[in-house]
Amino acid sequence: MMEEFLSTLPDEAKAVAEKAKIKNAEQALLTPTAHLLLQESSPHDIYVLKATAAKVMAKESIKVSDLFDLPYCMKWSRLSFGCEALDECTRGGVVTRGITEFCGASGTGKTQLLLQLSLMAQLPTDIGGLRASVAYICTEHAFPSNRLHELSKVFMNKYPKHDINYLANVHVEHIHHSEQLIKCCSERLPPLMSTERVRLIIIDSVAAVFRTYTDFVQRARDMRRLANCLLSLADKYNSAVICVNQVASISKKQPEVPCLGLAWSHLGRTRMRISKVPKQVICDDNFLTVRKLEVMYSPETPIAYAEFLITAEGAINVPQFPNVLNKLEK
């Protein structure tokens, strides 16, 4: 390595390296310029020495166009839904970048998807997980621990090779005020994420603590404070952040509009709407309502939608040839 580096230097720069007993490019970069000047070397020769060393140490450059050809797993991580239809719709799942919003009416299946994602996050990366723990913050109802326990048994049977204590890796907190939520994300989450390897943050829901505001200017400021904390954690730990939002009816033409207005929607990176489809499918002798996940906007995922079912085993694909009962025809 010494001969290769010295062979690339001009004679004057090579003399500088020999005087300072520099053996490789790394030493040339780390040696202070003041020290080289004491060796009676000219500033120009020192510049040539360090510039040549920097070129040797630099990584091979790539074109911007090459970045578009990289697979999605090389750009940033994605957390799989554990459902083929949803993964295909979202190009691999929830991205570990920015804030992802789940919005939808009550009873559409938002919490069911969050619980399934909480278990998927603990699986290895080669099967769509993050090999990490989860921070689950509830602001409305009590955490559905019984349902999580049921799904954990399903995952134990589905992935028997992986010895994972699913319940122990989900850290739950109940918060009912916005200031407590901001304090939790800014002060309590960082040490938890560094010690317990938390890579998925879930807030169910963000609308519950902000809808009661009467001062909308202050609400916008507090929402930005919360978003800044979440974005900082997502960037530092390469974590996925999912915030649930409620919907409200404005008119007949707009029966389901996400709450919190533009002040919140501009803070998120991806918005997914979950709703019920007016049809049922017979699955295992049971009538199941078809659900739909729709990507409303996202910088890396095309606008698309996918239908799925929620069963005792979690979110699954709609059967290819289902026995469908349209509710409008009942």
Image (tube, rainbow, N blue to C red):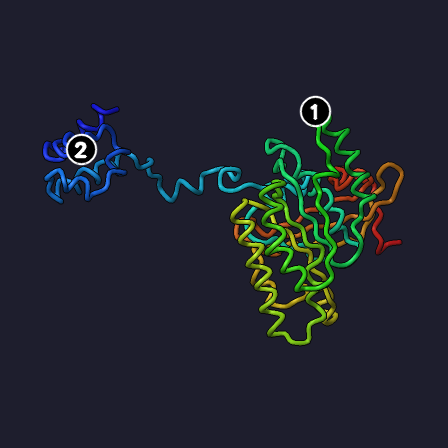
> Observer-nearest residue: 168 or 163?
168
The residue at the point 82 percent across, 48 percent down is: 289
The residue at the point 55 percent across, 54 percent down is: 231
Around disc 1, counting alpha carbons within 10 Å, would you say few (fewer than 14), some (14 to 19), or many (20 or more)? few
Residue under pointer 1? 161
Is residue 299 toward the left or the right of residue 101 in the image? Answer: left
Q: Examine the image and state in which quarter residue 115 appears.
A: top right
Q: Residue furthest bottom?
A: 215
> How many marks are shown on the rendered structure?
2
- How far is mark 2 from mark 1, CA to CA? 57 Å
For numbered disc 1, what is the local secondary structure? loop
Residue under pointer 2? 20
Image position, residue 297 (x, y; %) = 58, 56
> Observer-nearest residue: 265 or 160?
160
Image position, residue 248 (x, y; %) = 73, 66
Residue 128 disc label: none
Is residue 68 toward the left or the right of residue 200 in the image? Answer: left
For numbered disc 2, what is the local secondary structure? loop
Amino acid type assigned to the residue bearing label 1 in the image: Lys
Amino acid type assigned to the residue bearing label 2 in the image: Ala
Around disc 2, counting alpha carbons within 10 Å, would you say few (fewer than 14), some (14 to 19), or many (20 or more)? some
Which badge, 2 or 1, comes first in the chain's sequence?
A: 2
The residue at the point 66 percent across, 52 percent down is: 294
User: Which part of the image, by quadrant, shows the N terminus?
Assistant: top left
Question: Is there a contact, CB below 8 Å, between mark 2 and mark 1?
Answer: no
Is residue 212 toward the left or the right of residue 7 in the image? Answer: right
